[in-house]
Amino acid sequence: MRTGVLALQGDVPEHLAALGRGLGGLAPRPVRTPSDLEEIDALFLPGGESTSIARLLRDAGLWETLERRLRAGLPVLATCAGLILLAGHLEEGPSGPNPPTFGVLDVTVRRNDYGGQRESFEAPVRVQGLEGGDYPGVFIRAPRILKVGAKAEPFAWRDEEVVGVRQGPVWGLTFHPELSGDPRIHRRFLDAVSSPA
């Protein structure tokens, strides 16, 4: 499977390193142009600053191509800001105007709802069907999933709070698996979309 990491802004090197380190030397492609995006089978949409990423997607001519590929079923694992860009609805919060979204995940999200950089934290996350116990969740200026619609399915929780959802081949996380040193979620995603049930 040809994989790519959207490489416009955010924790791109961390995703590239996590994928190469933890998945048998997988070499994902940095995605910066529409032609890059056309040549991959699955995309990792990293954390960063959602408004900046949305603007850079437009500037790079990637917005329309990504929207088309998402509608056609491109598998995507989106973390933090990536989740915000995929959400069906953004609730207004303290972070200023919301960016546009692709609307492919049936969730309502509020940006930076746990607080700013100083309120970042680590906490165990329970991931449905993940072997090896709780996952080490890294939450940095994290969004909060306020509501999960009928089309989406929760699959990860911090205590009783939903922190991971999926809708077909599109997965969204409020935390950063690429910063955990634990490759299990990346591997689980790739296994699921390589051989969907």
Image (cartoon, grey):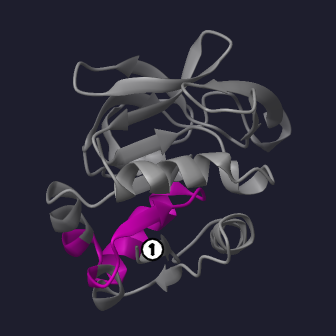
Extreme residue toward the top, this view: 160
The picture places residue 79, in percent across and down from the top left corner, at 55, 49
Image side of residue 136 versus residue 112, left or right: right
Q: Is residue 48 magenta?
A: yes
The residue nearer to you, when weighing 132 against 127, is: 132
Q: Quadrant of residue 165?
A: top left
What residue does disc 1 label?
Answer: 3
Q: Quadrant of residue 151?
A: top left
Q: Amino acid at mark 1?
A: Thr
Q: Which image quarter holds the C terminus?
A: top left
Picture residue at 53% right of the left edge, 77% below the top: 7
Residue 179 drawn at (x, y percent): 76, 54
Can residue 154 be seen here? The reply is yes
Report x, y in % for residue 58: 31, 74
> Residue 120: x percent and y percent?
80, 37
> Local crowd at mark 1 within 10 Å, few (<14), some, or many (≥20)?
many
Along the line of sight, the residue nearer the viewer: 66 or 177: 177
Residue 22 part of the magenta-drawn span: no
Q: Nearer the viewer, residue 86 or 59?
A: 86
The magenta segment: 38-65
Count numbered badges in the picture.
1
Q: Residue at x 35, y 78 (%)?
A: 40
> Is any part of residue 91 visible from this angle?
no
Q: What residue is shown at x 45% (from left), y 19% (from top)?
A: 146
Q: Secondary structure at mark 1?
A: strand
Left/right of residue 141 with respect to residue 146 in the rendered view: right
Left/right placement of residue 11 relative to residue 171 reads right
Vertical arrangement, residue 68 with respect to residue 78, above or below: below
The quarter of the rendered structure image containing the N terminus is bottom left
